[in-house]
Image (tube, helix red, strand yellow):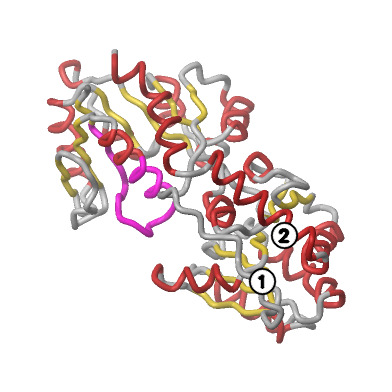
Amino acid sequence: MSRILLAAATLEAGRGGIARVARMSARALAEAGHTVDAVSYLDAEDPKLPVASFAAAMGSKARFALLCHLAAARADVAIYDSVGIARARPRLPGLRRPHAIWMHGIEAWEQLGAAAKAAFLGADLVLVNSDYTRARFTALHGPSPAGRVCWLATEDDTALGPPEVDPKKPPCVLLLSRVEATEGYKGHAELLAAWPAVVARAPTARLIFAGGGSGVAALREAAASSPVAPSIEVLGFVPENELAGLWARASVFAMPSRGEGFGLVYIEAMRHGLPVIASRHDAGAEVNVDGVTGFNVVLDDAGELADRLIALLVDEQLMQRMCEAARVRWTEHFRYSAFRTRLLGAVGELVSG
């Protein structure tokens, strides 16, 4: 077994997808018998993971770099949760270790500077979250010989769906995501544009937007100006302990995004037994099987999104079939135990060498 330095921006639960991947990585490596020394840049408190040691930099770049150097001195291998965090890897000859870097998506597609490109190309292993992300990186920056696709997963193995059929419950389409004013690629605008046509065919349907961020106020204003505004809810930030109730309300999960490197929330929806509406423009089409676990739409076709939503909301048999297929796909590919197997397979040669 190896001693592994795992360096992350944060390992705190509920802090986003990259943090979840780092948490799962630490847990999987520790469960396999490796000694894991976790170092966090942002955290102040111990995230209570099954690791040998935990060190927190509390937002100090200098302290984080020092902690990574100290951990590297006793480590056999290092794993960095992103290319940004990998800037703290030791360069001194006596502290260099075989290392892996996680590649998550958009940070490797359009915003990759020379130093970050060199970091990816110089890594002994690049853990890539999807074939889509790897293809986008290759198209822009050339092949990464050390790249290895490792699909992500939820943090557990327990299914939570499909939802109970309640004839009194209005059908609800849920989009759960951060809402950032500077991004706008998650599909909020497209859902608002499609929603009047959906309500015309499914009058009791509700559209729920959940998630905090700098764009919530503008989203509320846009929803209020919709001709079907009474059927739309903009909840803003929803605390972690209230998410179960939100998922229970949902009938369909829709996030027709243009910029997902993987889309952890898609598989969380599948875990709850919900059909998924994604797009054909990003990795959503790799995770969600079109016509089986939901639909992947072309966002430039204004009517397709509305048509797919209507099909699910008015056809009970189609809805039930896709609910079950979504849960089966999650069970087969996206449980934590499946991720652990993939990750250990990917890093096996690195840690054994």
Which class describes the residues within 10 Å of circle 1: few (<14), some (14-19), or many (20+)?
Answer: few
- Residue 301 screen position, x and y as percent: 85, 54
- Which residue is under mark 2? 320
Up/down of 304 relative to 136, above or below:
below
- Residue 69 screen position, x and y as percent: 17, 31
Instruction: Find numbered disc 2 in the image and state the secondary structure of the residue it sits on.
Output: helix
Up/down of 334 relative to 172, above or below:
above
Residue at 77% over, 51% down: 297
Between 178 and 316, the one lying in front of the other is 316
Drawn side of residue 86 relative to residue 197, left or right: left
Drawn side of residue 350 relative to residue 238, left or right: left
Q: Which residues are magenta?
A: 5-24
Residue at 37% over, 19% down: 124
- Residue 220 screen position, x and y as percent: 61, 79
- Which residue is under mark 1? 165
Residue 19 on the magenta span: yes
Residue at 25% over, 24% down: 77
Alpha carbon of mark 1 to alpha carbon of mark 2: how far? Answer: 9 Å
Residue at 33% over, 18% down: 350
Residue 344 on the magenta span: no
Which class describes the residues within 10 Å of circle 2: few (<14), some (14-19), or many (20+)?
Answer: some
Q: Amino acid at mark 2?
A: Gln
Q: Is mark 1 in CB contact (under 8 Å) with mark 2?
A: yes
Numbered marks: total: 2
Give the position of the N terminus as an image quadrant. top left
